[in-house]
Each structure stands twice: as structure tokens, then as C-alpha cells.
Amino acid sequence: MTNMIRAEVITIGDEILFGQITDTNTQWIGTELTNIGIRPVRKTSVGDQADAILNVLQEAHQRADVIIITGGLGPTKDDITKKTLCTYFGVGMVRNEVALALVTGFFEKRGRAMTDINRAQADLPANAVYMQNDWGTAPGMWFEHEGRVYVSLPGVPFEMKHLMTNRILPKLGSHFQTPIIKHKIIRTVALGESFLAERIEAWEDALPNHIRLAYLPSFGGVRLRLTATGDDNAQLNRELAEQVEKVLPLIEKNVFGYDDDELETVVGRLLSEKNLTLGVAESCTGGYVSSQITKVPGSSAYFWGGVVSYSNVVKVNQLGVQAATLEQFGAVSEETVRQMAEGVRQALGTNVGIATSGIAGPDGGTPDKPVGTIWIACATANRTIARLLKLGQYRDQNIQLTTTYVLNLLREELLSDK
Amino acid sequence: MTNMIRAEVITIGDEILFGQITDTNTQWIGTELTNIGIRPVRKTSVGDQADAILNVLQEAHQRADVIIITGGLGPTKDDITKKTLCTYFGVGMVRNEVALALVTGFFEKRGRAMTDINRAQADLPANAVYMQNDWGTAPGMWFEHEGRVYVSLPGVPFEMKHLMTNRILPKLGSHFQTPIIKHKIIRTVALGESFLAERIEAWEDALPNHIRLAYLPSFGGVRLRLTATGDDNAQLNRELAEQVEKVLPLIEKNVFGYDDDELETVVGRLLSEKNLTLGVAESCTGGYVSSQITKVPGSSAYFWGGVVSYSNVVKVNQLGVQAATLEQFGAVSEETVRQMAEGVRQALGTNVGIATSGIAGPDGGTPDKPVGTIWIACATANRTIARLLKLGQYRDQNIQLTTTYVLNLLREELLSDK
């Protein structure tokens, strides 16, 4: 087996430490490195202070073979990554003509005047290999220093992703000889972590040493991640497939997919295969179910649309819910959610309709129907099914869990052939 | 001035390093520590290996006064935080009776059988001060060791937040004497970072030393964060207010709010103040605009509902868009988006209607209307305004930017009194 290549990911910016922006970069970088067989061993965030940056670079040098740095490359005064890299490597700053031409072109194309701080974006540490950023004015940079590779990238996610995908990952792949790490993720829904663990305990205990299992809980489900390390690609894939085959009978009803599958992509595939169209009626989820479904490219092939019926007037006029039903049972009731699912199916002329109605919180609860009381339904040509959820008191969580459960109800109905 | 209390936040879990889950905890913890005057100096993620955890604990001991550790407390075999803390502190594990009663009660309440791995959740390192978790079976723990405070919390976000808010933050506040750090964030929209920087350069250069400025770009806007450090609360607040007053005339049109304000909360406030109701018609944003609006607790007071009109049939039947308009100008056109905004206003009976229609990508572009061509509109009792956006090629980004811009268009219309 070849040596394990270790990576450290460093994020620079006070805004990360102070919690003022969400860092989505390191998650994405972790996935991409793992996929090419480089093992992330640490992720670190430090502030915009030169000494903090110098310290973490020195430490990372001891721990890792490749050090990926994001952030601190913007045009403004608080961005100090390039200066600090000059200090760290003991080099000066040099204006890069290719980078300058790119920055100039970027501003010309948009018909905007260029400023000195924009021009300075083409100044790079003298030992940098310039990695062209097609989507912005901050440069990508590659350094080789005392047997380590350092990569510096802008913190803007789509610029970073473009540089990693098109420039850095291919270069890392050819620079290092990497061992093979294979992951297989089993996506489960509607079964808690400890119950899942009990059910598959014997199988887990019998896993060979080079295959590890992790439980990754998320809203309404758990991802079971198998990680196999070795030097034979085909054999690792075979072994992972065998393990999945062994565990599947124990949890089959709760498995909705594998790896990158999401409930919205799985139900999208099922709808496409069966040539069915979908309409969505949402009350407490407020558009979140529709927005999850339409995150999927090409979803317009099966998703015709939705109605967010926050007010009862909209439930009556757009979905045909009967005023008497609302009067007698209330908006949060089995009767109403059934009429919503059937109503959106009819109003939009789709084959299937799903619906949500509940009390997301924090206000609006009663002793009979506390916050977290939520009904979901699915209506097909043959039948309508409704389920009651008893969730917690947090609005965001209730919205996300309800979305998971109503998509899972839809999945079950599509599979049941009823 | 009192001494700066430094914090380090450590996240434990291979799943974080490998990018298989999104870490939202450290952002939240960073904000909360900053708010009580404790300065986060580093954030670190390490894997589920005892040596990696021991190393980072030893390092953090050198750098920080308080070390907050999340993750690795679940009931399953890959969770090793407690064992490793025993090694680090040189203590054994002791079953905590209060914790056991809580775990037992948790299972009884749900009518579920308890397992040995659940029972083991009540075993704590002998030097731990038990911090009761009301929302789950994993414990919170507080340690004092060689002049440092260590806190260990479960990684499940709502359990962690509950423990931090109700137990840890109050205890940290009374344990340390903290200096005062005040933040003021100015939220801007629709002006790029470098143009903003040019416009406020003279003001920025004149800031006193104890007030720092950071530019935090996000979708469609930039947050300007002022950070003031000192020991007089009232004086810091006064100085921050003065600086805001100075910079505001330079960027007033682009400022939509301060601190935690979001466009959806600001338009919600404006709608409430003016006693107006809102309906939303979405094509390319697929429900995302409605879901952002309804994230706000109490939004049902002004948001009546929305129609996600992905198919043209829904545009015609639910929103009253004319078939001839769709035929002549296409779904992505000024004419259509105007009829959508006016149509949803009429169909739902609201005072104001907003609409989006465009090509989010990755497919569906034409030479005339490439991916990223998006129309937005706002209809009031007095007039309808439409705008063309020329965005990029990334679906997620187009959906988010369009949502920002249509909420900003609504904000401008609500302020214009037209």
C-alpha cells in the first residue's frame, strides 16, 4: 500500500471565528480530497492576524503533506494572506502579468473602471505558481516548499470550487501517489441512530479491519458511511458492495438511497420512471418542500408547481379545501391536509399531490395541538394517505423534518404501486 | 482593560473532515462567545482518533483559556470523546446517577426499551461537572484543569445550543472577567465589495485603532462589520453609532438593515407597519422566496401564500397569465413576470405581489436567453415594476441571488410609497 497523503485545510478570516459567515468551503474541500484518496487530518480556522496565520502554517507543515488555504485574498484592507505567505516563504511580492491581464479584462468586460486595489490583486509571492481564476479577480496559487505543497485560494465559494475542480485537484492527483480510499454511504430515513445501531450490531462487529463504519445523523435520518482503505480499486468496490448486501435486509424499509442520493432526487427519479407529475400544497413548510424539489436540475420534467397556502383563504380558493372542514376540524387536521393533497392534485392537474399542515412554532400552539403537531398527506389516483407527526418546538427543525417525512411518504407511495 | 479571554473551538468527527456533514455548530458558538466578550482565536476539526484528539487538546491548552469541544458523544462505537478525555485528564469513568435517571426517563417517556449503549451515556470522566441536557441522552460536561476550562458538548445542533444557552454561557460569564467587545454590522445589498470599498475608503482610513472593519460578502450583498474593543460599554456603543452615522450617507441606498437583520425580516417589518399583505409567484426560484419569507416566526401575519408555477399550465390557470403572452414573449420575459406579479396579487387577494421567472440552469438556455437570464417583478395597488437580472451559470446561486434581488425590489417599493 502506498503512503497515506495527509491534508490540512486552513480557513483564514475573523468572520469565520466570530461566526459571522457560514463556512461551506471546508466541507466541500474535505469531500473532494477524500475522493481522490487524500486524507484530511485536520481543519483549522484562524483570524486575520499574521502571527496566527504563521503559527498554523508552521504546525500544518509538521502534520500534513498538502496544505490548502482559503480566504484573505479579497481586495480590501483586512485581507492579508498574500503578505503573510511572503513572510512565511521568505520571498517578495511580484506583479504577475497574466494575472493582471485577467483582472483588467474582467473589468473591461463589465465596463467598469479599475482601481489600484484591483490592480494589486495581480501581485503574487515570488515563488507562487499562478492558477488562473476564471470567475473572479482573486488569484489561485500553488507553492512547493520543503517537501510540502501549499495551495492558496479565494474564499468565495464558487471561485474556490472552480479553481479546485479545474486546476488544483488534477495537479494534486498527478503530484502525489495516493492510496485508494473508497466510501459507500447508505442513506436511511425515519429510524433513530441508537435503534439503527442495535439492529445492525452483529454485522458491524463482523466488519473487517480495513472497513470502518460511521453513523452520521441528519434531519430525520442517518447516513451510514463505510470507508474502505487498500490498494486495489476493484477489490475495495467489491468488498463494499458485499457489506451493503449483508446489511440491507436488516434495514431495507428505511434505506432510500446511496452516496449523494437525497430524498428529492430519489422521488424525482421515481416520478420520471413512472411518468407521473407532482403538485405540492404547503402550509407550515412555507415553500420549503417545493424549493427542495426544485433544487434538482431538470425537476421541471415532473414538478408542475405548488401552492403555499399560509392563509385559510388561499386553502379554500386555490386548493378547494371546504370552509366547513376548516371550521369544524381546523387547518391543522387530518381532514384539511387530505383535502389539500387532493386539492392541489386537482387544481394543478397532476397525477400526485402532497401536502403539509401544522404548527411550526414558536407560537400558535394550543393544549390540544401543541407546537410540533403536523399533518402530512399524499394523494394519488387511487388513494389518499395522511400521517400525524409529533415534532418539537423549533421552527426551522420542524420545517426541515416535515419536508423529509412528506418526501418519504411520497417515496413509499410511489414504491407501493397502490 | 481586563485581559482578553481566548477560546478555542474543537469539533470531533471524521464526518466533518471528510465533508460528509455540514458543521453549523462552530459558527453559532463563535457568535455566542463573541457576544459575551470571549474571543475565539482558533477553530479546529479533527477525526475520531484518540491521538489526534489528544494532540489538539494539548495544543489548545497552550493557546486558549477556554476550550469548547463538540461531537463524539453519541451512543455508537465511533464516538470516543469521553474515553479520550479520561486519558487526557488522567481520570477514570464514573456512572453519574443524575445523568442515568435522565436517560432512563427519556426512554420511558417515549415508551421505548433502553439498551446498554444508552445506559453507558451516563458514564462520565471522574472530574466532570455534569451539565444536564434536557433534549437528548448525551451529556454536557464542564472541566477545570490546570487553569483552563474545558467544555464537552454533543454535536447535535439543537442539544448543543440548548446546553450552551442555558448552562455553559452563564457559567462562563461568571467564571471569567471578560473585556468588552462590541460589534455593529451594516447590511448592504446590490453593491460589490470593491465598489463599496472605494466609496468608503476615506472613512475607513480614519477609523480609530480600537475599531476594526471587515467586509463579509454574501449572496448579493456585503456585511460591513465594525468591531470595537474597550472597557466602557456605553462609550463603545456611542462610538459605533457615531461611525455608522458617518458612513451611512455614502451608501444609504444600499443599506437595508443592521446586525441580525435579513431582507426577509426587514420586508416583514415594513409590510406589518404598513398593514399590507403579500403573495408570491415563483417560477425559477421554485418556492425558495416563500420559504425564506416563512422562515420568520409570525410571517403568517402578512404572508398569505404563494404559487410555484413551474409549468406554463399553472401560470395560466392559477395566476391568470395569458396564453398569448407566453406564446409571443415566452415564460422568461418582462410581459410574463408582470402578469405573474399582478396575477398572484389578484388570485390571492393580497395588497402586494412579487414574481420571478428565469432560467436557473444548468440547462434550458438559448442564445437569446442564456442561463442566468431572470426577470423579477413587484406589483402594488399603484404600479408594477419589473427588472432584468443577468446572472451566472450556477443553479443554486441563481436561485439565491434572485431571491435576494426580488426581496430587495419589494423593500424599495415599500419604501418608495408609490
Image: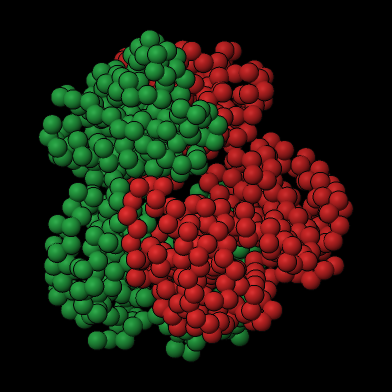
Chain colours: A red, B green
Quarter of the image with the C terminus of chain B in it = top left
Position in image of residue A123 (x %, y %):
46, 70
Quarter of the image with the N terminus of chain B in it = bottom left
Residue found at the far top of this picture: B324
Between residue A218 and residue B240, name the one nearer to us. B240
Residue drawn at x 14%, y 57% as measured from the top left: B249
Residue drawn at x 31%, y 72% as measured from the top left: B36
B30 to the left or right of B118: left
**Residue B94 seen in the current view:** no
Position in image of residue A343 (x %, y %):
43, 16
**Residue B338 seen in the current view:** yes
Between residue B178 and residue B222, name the one nearer to us. B222
Residue drawn at x 36%, y 81% as measured from the top left: B5
Residue drawn at x 53%, y 46% as measured from the top left: A219
Residue found at the far bottom of this picture: B146
Q: Is residue B19 above or below residue A71?
A: above
Position in image of residue B180 (x %, y %):
25, 77
Q: How many marks?
A: 0
Q: Is residue B313 above or below residue A49?
A: above
A241 to the left or right of A327: right
Between residue B189 and residue B307, name the one nearer to us. B189
Position in image of residue A82 (x %, y %):
47, 73
B417 to the left or right of A19: left
B290 to the left or right of A69: left
